[in-house]
Image: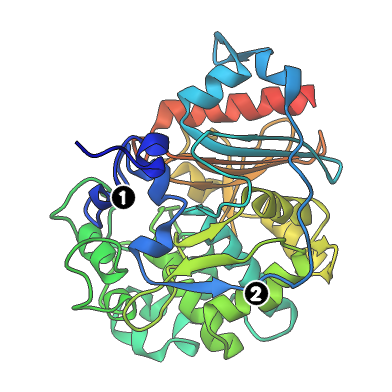
């Protein structure tokens, strides 16, 4: 009889049980979401050398506090467990006031943030716009000429940034026969990848029978294309650009990583992995109008546009009004239109970067939820964040 390993005792399964076919499923995602680089080829996003992270701050008595979440009372600790939280970091007025980690996650671990990667990629676009190297109103083909035969032939970078490309594509996360499954093979995220690169997949996509700019349609390929656009505009690979324009000036304490395809193209729409406190620092930089400890990262005007601009009518024609009834989407950030003026980045399986400017609070939450999309739990998360902002 063989004895269990420390890994098996912590996670409840053996490392050999995790594969490219199941790494986004429970229970395996409690490990794989912190180790995406073992599942998919990845590039390093270097942090500035010499910076040391402070010790975590215990949430203390807040864990036992009862909070009202959409009509139900629940303790903070209970909600963290129910929502499969792996890590939580809370900042108030620029200072960390509470951290929480599941037994399966250490404070220095990097966790995949899925579609919050989109929000980070847009920050790179904002930095390049501020330098005059990227024009959001320019045609996509100015940067990616080979997209001329695709849906992007007459789209602008602005359409890509705001998800108003009229793209014939569905985010069918659980359908193994869908175009989405082919997309994930191109990103090397699913078995059978490598026959088609991400770039080749993107420039083969076709339009719907509607002009661009009319409807908010959440389509991840747009953000992967944005990753290619910022590479072409800057002349740098995505991971190097992220390091130089965001991670180092942000004062991130730990390196990040991003998954790449067979050509080395970054999964700019969802492949970034970072530490939970460093993700919170991104939100704090946004709250401060684009400035971090290393100086200005994006122009104040870009931040103002991101958190106040956008097309409300396009949002209303979309399918996410259940989350924010009067929201908007601008530069790959969500505006809640709630009284707090909160805005956020959101990723599947329960990844959140939530900024409440009125309460001066930033919350980063990393999770390993069972379902990629869980609409009722998303609403509960928003209510949870509002409750935390009111208490810290």
The residue labelled by disc 1 is 15
Q: Residue at x 16, y 67 (%)?
A: 192
Viewer-nearest residue: 212 or 157: 157
Residue 311 appears in the rendering: no
The residue labelled by disc 2 is 243
Total marks placed: 2
Residue, far front:
1
Q: Earlier in the sequence, mark 2 or mark 1?
A: 1
Q: Are marks 2 and 1 in contact (CB under 8 Å)?
A: no
Q: Is residue 195 left or right of residue 18?
A: left
Q: Secondary structure beneath disc 2?
A: helix
Position of residue 391 relative to residue 2, above or below, is above
Residue, far left:
177
- Percent coordinates x, y for residue 206 in the rendering: 26, 71
Q: Secondary structure beneath disc 1?
A: helix
- Percent coordinates x, y for residue 307 in the rendering: 70, 51
Viewer-nearest residue: 120 or 62: 62
Viewer-nearest residue: 128 or 47: 47
Position of residue 113 relative to residue 8, above or below, is below
- Mark 2 vs mark 1, foreground winner is 1
Quarter of image, res 290? bottom right
- Percent coordinates x, y for residue 25 in the rendering: 30, 42
Q: Check the picture and name the quadrant holding the N terminus.
A: top left
Q: Residue at x 71, y 85 (%)?
A: 132
Quarter of image, res 35? bottom left
Q: Residue at x 68, y 22 (%)?
A: 387
Position of residue 225 relative to residue 109, above or below, is below
Q: Separation of disc 2 and disc 1 at Cα?
A: 30 Å
């Amino acid at each position: 009889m063989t004895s269990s390993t420390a890994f098996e005792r912590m996670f409840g399964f053996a490392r050999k049980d995790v594969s490219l076919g199941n790494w986004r499923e429970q229970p395996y995602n409690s490990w794989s979401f912190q180790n995406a680089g073992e599942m998919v080829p990845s590039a390093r996003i270097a942090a500035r050398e010499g910076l040391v992270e402070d010790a975590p701050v215990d949430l203390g008595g807040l864990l036992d506090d009862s909070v009202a979440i959409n009509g139900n009372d629940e303790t903070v600790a209970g909600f963290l467990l129910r929502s499969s939280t792996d890590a939580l970091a809370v900042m108030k007025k620029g200072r960390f006031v509470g951290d929480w980690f599941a037994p399966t996650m250490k404070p220095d671990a990097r966790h995949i943030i899925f579609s919050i990667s989109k929000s980070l990629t847009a920050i790179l676009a904002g930095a390049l716009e501020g330098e005059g190297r990227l024009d959001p109103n320019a045609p996509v083909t100015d940067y990616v000429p080979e997209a001329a035969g695709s849906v992007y032939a007459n789209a602008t970078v602005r359409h890509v940034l705001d998800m108003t490309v009229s793209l014939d594509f569905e985010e069918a996360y659980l359908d193994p026969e869908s175009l989405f499954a082919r997309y994930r093979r191109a990103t090397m995220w699913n078995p059978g990848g490598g026959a088609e690169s991400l770039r080749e997949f993107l420039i083969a996509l076709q339009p719907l029978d509607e002009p661009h700019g009319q409807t908010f349609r959440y389509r991840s390929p747009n953000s992967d294309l944005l990753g290619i656009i910022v590479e072409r505009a800057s002349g740098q690979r995505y991971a190097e650009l992220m390091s130089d324009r965001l991670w180092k000036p942000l004062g991130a304490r730990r390196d990040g990583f991003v998954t790449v395809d067979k050509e080395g193209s970054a999964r700019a729409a969802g492949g970034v992995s970072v530490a939970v406190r460093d993700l919170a620092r991104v939100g704090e930089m946004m709250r401060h109008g684009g400035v971090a400890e290393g100086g200005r990262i994006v122009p104040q005007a870009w931040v103002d546009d991101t958190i106040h601009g956008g097309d409300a009518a396009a949002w209303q024609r979309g399918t996410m009004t259940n989350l924010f009834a009067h929201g908007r989407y601008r530069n790959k950030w969500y505006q809640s239109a709630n009284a707090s003026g909160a805005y956020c980045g959101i990723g599947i399986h329960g990844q959140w970067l939530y900024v409440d400017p009125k309460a001066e609070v930033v919350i980063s939450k990393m999770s390993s939820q069972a379902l990629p999309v869980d609409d009722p739990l998303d609403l509960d998360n928003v209510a949870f964040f509002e409750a935390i902002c009111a208490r810290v």
